[in-house]
Image (cartoon, rainbow, N blue to C red):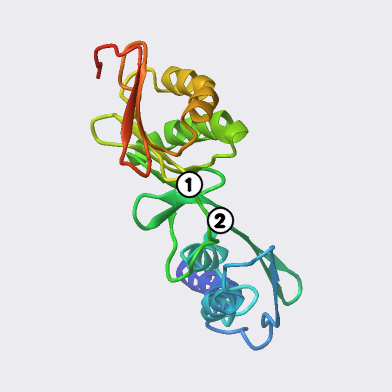
Amino acid sequence: MSALSRIVAWTLALALVVLPVVAVVNGWIGAERWPLRTLRLHGDLDLVDQQRVRNAVLPYASRGYFAVRLADVHAAVAQLPWVASVDVRKRWPDILEVRVVEHRPFAWWGADRLLSAHGRIFQRGRLLPPQGLPRLSGPDARVADVVALYNESRELFLPQSLSIHSLALDARGSWSLVLSDGARIVIGKNEARLRLQRFARVLPQLRAQQQRSMERADLRYTNGFAVTWKGHDGASLTRIQNPGPST
């Protein structure tokens, strides 16, 4: 046998071995012989639509056990609303397992997005989140700062049976918040935590003296603040130490 004949023979033999494997892996053949018959969906899902998960998986799973690309399944499920993370695995002989973790909303972020309990911003899609979520806003890069101040503010006003309705950091770096009773607190740019701590310490005494609801507090002073109170005879203003305003 000539050298050329031997090369041709080895090439044909190799092709007979490789091509069936390639065909199975690419789903050209074998989908009926090694089908994926069972989809196991794991996860504590309240807001992720399980049927939408199944519909997203089906086009890829129909290619069979060997041909299904787990990365494709992962990408298809990960883009569904409220999906935080996905894990996809195959179990011999005919099982595809998909584990989904959904976002747990912590707060609104800006006008129409949500912030998860892990600090990730995500779109709500067509689903409505639970009622009563606080409204936080600020530059996306400052999520951690906004959440940190929100948590501290919540603890400061809790003894007064007040919660934080909203907290905002504007483009100029100035902070403000709205309490659950509707009172607006303008904090300013500098020493936001210190200013809130000082104000929260004296607020019980001020409320006891006034015997009415607070409408607005301006903390943008070096050593004090100004408070506007609601009343039947109109709003009144209380100035504490009346210092000059700072930024």
* 8 relative to 61 in the view: left or right: left
Q: What residue lies at 32% left-to-right and 12% top-to-bottom?
A: 222
Mark 1 crowd level (few <14, some 14–19, many ≥20, 10 Å Cα) = some
Q: Position of residue 52 (x, y in %)?
A: 54, 77
Of the pair 11 and 198, the residue shown nearer to us: 198
Of the numbered discs in the image, which one, if any, rests on residue 120?
A: 1
Is there a contact, CB below 8 Å, between mark 2 and mark 1?
yes
Circle 2 SS class: loop
Q: Position of residue 138 (x, y in %)?
A: 34, 40
Residue type, mark 2 in image = His
Q: Position of residue 12 (x, y in %)?
A: 53, 76
Check the image and report above or below for 230 versus 30: above
Which residue is tagged 2?
A: 103
Q: Earlier in the sequence, mark 2 or mark 1?
A: 2
Quadrant in the picture for the C terminus: top left
Q: Quadrant of residue 176?
A: top left
Q: What residue lies at 54% left-to-right and 63% top-to-bottom?
A: 74
Check the image and report above or below for 224 versus 33: above
Q: Quadrant of residue 166?
A: top left
Of the pair 186 and 237, the residue shown nearer to us: 237
Outermost residue toward the bottom?
32
